[in-house]
Amino acid sequence: MQKLKKIRLGYIIFLLISLGVIFLTVMFMSKREPEAPKYEPAPPEAPRLSSLGAIGESLDFDSEVRYYEIKVPAGNPYLPTIWANAVSADTKLNIYQAFFANSSNEASARIYLDDGKYKNSYEVKFVKDSALGLVLQYDDRYTFVPNYALKDGEAFVFSVESDSGNVTVDQSGVIRVIGVSDETSQVKAYVEDRLVDTLTITKTVKACLNMFIVAGQGNAAGIGGNIEESIKPLAGTSYTVELDDRAFEMKDLSSGREGFTPALASQWYLNTGEKSLFVQTAVSDVSITDWTQSGEAYKMALARIDYFKNKFAEESSPYSLSRVFCVWLHGEWDIAQGMKSDEYIYYFNDFYNGLKENISLDMTVVIPVRASLTKGDSHNEIAPVCSAQYMLGNIYEDLRIITRIPDNSNVENGMVGADNLYYTQKGYNEIGRDTAFNLFNCYSSNTDKSVRKIEVFGNTHEDLFEYGETIEIEKGETIRTVAVVSPLYAETTKVNVSFDSKKLSYSNGGIVEVREENDGTVAEMLFSCGGIDFRFNIKCIVEKNNSNVDKKLYTWEFDDLNEISGLNNLTLSKKSLADQYSISDGVLTSANRQADFNFTLPVELKSDFDWSIEWTGVLYDNSIILGNSFSTKGYIYLAPFAQNMGYSIRLVEDNGQTFYLPYGDYAEQCRVMNSWMIEYIHGSKTIALRLNGTVIAEIVVEKTFSFNLTNLFGRYGSDNVNYCYSGSIDELKITFLSPVYEEQG
């Protein structure tokens, strides 16, 4: 028994000692710094850094150690710049600096290495530590919340004690930094005469500032926007210098502004914690030729930019310039003037190379043009200029399309104003936010920048091609291609294009043409970027087979509802009211939009062949002349009096593609009896509007299209939506080639 007691006693003593050791170990561990994340070691063959450092900070570098941590003061400290060198000069090295997102306490810089076979990465994390003090940047706003619970009837009274006078405080406890100083400042909170808390600001430093050069024309300037509806950035985080300000005064953006800049500024600060300055240089109604290095717009912009770069370089400046961006939003003017893709690219290159040489831009970003513009009698489609802008994003590493919001902006969804030209403030807000999101992700160390897909469109941002599909075109015919790399913030958006140059040609505007020596075989187009590709085939049709088509000519003289040959007579549609139209002396009149007529045979107008629609008539109001009773697509809408449609004829084909033929100065000619014609010429890919035989508008349509029309003066849509013809028609004639139909008895 004695032995048993000794054993138990020894066991108890051992247990107590063990528990004590565990307790001491836990206590010791609780006081240790948290361990760094356990990084998996890189493969032995992976590339390594030869050196790594942070400006102004000491870093104990070891090429095998991939994680480092640097503590910085609380508040809004200025982050040190990370630098690094790879062991091999052949290794691709990318350094992404750290951003303290607004209110964040941690931020990481990352260094990525790629030797073509193996990859490696390093991380330097910055962690805010209040033990190192509180640092604020110039013009920061910081709210002091005292550690004291106010009682009924009590209120805080704040004051500043500082020899440098670098901070102020209002009676809401909001501190504003008004100077840069290494001296300590104290902000004190009193309740009556009793000091209840003190906030110590260790020092105030220069503000990190990003300069955005806003270039282009009216939409870049924010025309059509609304200050009250704009985003309101936080005070002291963003500024604007207006075009008409000769003194170049930096005004706070916190009260808002027309255009996209407040939304961009707000989102940029939210993501980066860095301030922004928008230097307004956009000029309304100017061609890109004014932005070449000999142009007045370019010279004006360069003078403003030089002023601020020199100002921020001064030792006394409270700002430290971090990055310089150019935001380009332009194109409507040159669309209206019929500029070609290669011309636009030529002029833009002059502007772009001039800025790079004179200013050392970090990146140029393009907000692509979204719509066509009518200027008098001149009207051209969006395709040449818009495709040129997308092409520029495929050419340069430091230039990219930064948002695709314009692709889906229109009058109907409220993103564009009734003039169909300038964005609404709603549209500007969305563009600004998306621009900031994509631009931030170009620089964020936490974002996956791998290329995920390439989309190729047949014309600007419409007619999406399918991977591997075969497109048939005739010898000498062209198609326009636009390649878009996703995501927009991918590490590279530079696209390589490969093709058989003996069979095809490829121009700067993305236009593919079949060469004359093409023997009718299939040729492949290959677009590649970042290890991702997109392929499609082009088959040359040496001679098109027209054996299955027939020429059609339908004429209605409106002595009754019969077509002159009797092949395509009209019947009143079921939705129509018989007493709402009349026929007299060869003229059909429908004044109240309550009558339309079904064709005996449908009318198909395609991009494969020539066709024309001729009529002599008077128009009382905007109306459909040809339609489809079963769809909201497939109709021709005469809208000479509709401002939101540019006073034009609106052609909406079966897939929803929309083409506009503007009346220009001839809209009022619709109110009297005149002869009109819409004519499509397949060889030149043009749709023209003729008045009494004279062309008054013409557009080039390189995309394929098809209209399947079932109604004359056609109603479409729901029972409550009525756009039937309002006016008088003396004669109407349709000429086209069409697949052969069996006649219906």
Image (cartoon, rainbow, N blue to C red):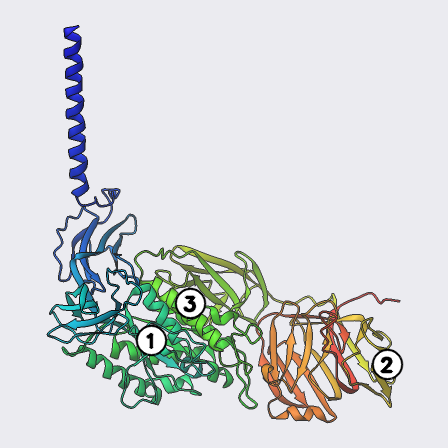
- The residue at 75%/88% (across/down) is 616
Residue at (43, 62) in percent of width and height? 485
Describe the element under mark 2 as helix, strand or loop: helix
Dots 3, 2 in contact, CB < 8 A: no
- Neighbour tally class for label 2: few under 14, some 14-19, many 20 plus, Cα within 10 Å: few
| Classed neighbour count for the residue bearing mark 1: other residues with Cα under 10 Å, few (<14), some (14–19), many (≥20) | many
Q: Quadrant of the C terminus?
A: bottom right
162 left or right of 257 in image: left
User: In terms of sequence position, does the residue under pointer 3 or pointer 2 come before the other?
Assistant: 3
Q: Nearer the viewer, mark 2 or mark 1?
A: 2
Location of the N terminus (image quadrant) = top left
Give how far apart the Cα atoms at labels 1 and 3 are.
16 Å
Hey, which quadrant is residue 169 in on the image?
A: bottom left
Residue 119 position within the rendered picture, expressed as x and y whole percent measured from the top left: 28, 49
Give the residue number, with chain letter if any, for mark 3: 434
Amino acid beneath label 1: Cys
- Residue in front for this viewpoint, 558 or 552: 558
Q: Residue at x 57, y 73 (%)?
A: 702
